[in-house]
Image: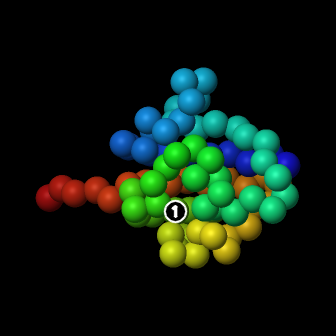
Amino acid sequence: MKVKLKLYATLGKYLPPTAKRNEIDLTVDETTSVLDLLTSHNVPMETCHLILVNGVFSPPANAANATLKNGDIVAVWPPVAGG
């Protein structure tokens, strides 16, 4: 099945060089979870502060239980600081 992975800010370094605009289209198994997707790209879960699946918040603690569906878009941001 097809999904899109978007990694923002410092997480962009975990995408392959073929990624454009911090995103890549992928083909994954139907049993793939958010955790599986991020692990397959060597993204450390402790760097995943905000995870959205199709624009809806998905708690990082539930990443192993969040099974993806065809066409899903997973967007991830690291913790940010500022003021």
Amino acid on which the number 1 mark rests in the picture: Ile
Q: Give the class, few, some or many, for how many residues have Cα within 10 Å of label 1's Cα (few <14, many ≥20).
A: many
Query: What's the coloring here?
Result: rainbow
Q: Position of residue 77 (x, y in %)?
A: 43, 54
- Judging depth in this view, the residue of 32 and 55 nearest the camera is 32
Give how far across and how far down residue 6 sits, in percent. Answer: 56, 45
For the C terminus, the image quarter is: bottom left
Q: Which residue is mark 1?
A: 51
Is residue 56 something one can see in this rendering? Answer: no
Give the SS element for disc 1.
strand
**At which x and y percent is residue 1?**
85, 49
Residue 57, picture quadrant = bottom right
Quarter where residue 54 is shown: bottom right
The residue at 39%/57% (across/down) is 47
Residue beneath the point at 63% across and 70% down: 64
- Does 20 sit left or right of 9 as displayed? right
Residue 12 higher or lower than 55, as above or below: above
Q: Nearer the viewer, residue 44 or 25?
A: 44
| Left or right: residue 23 compared with residue 67 | left
Any part of residue 47 in sight: yes
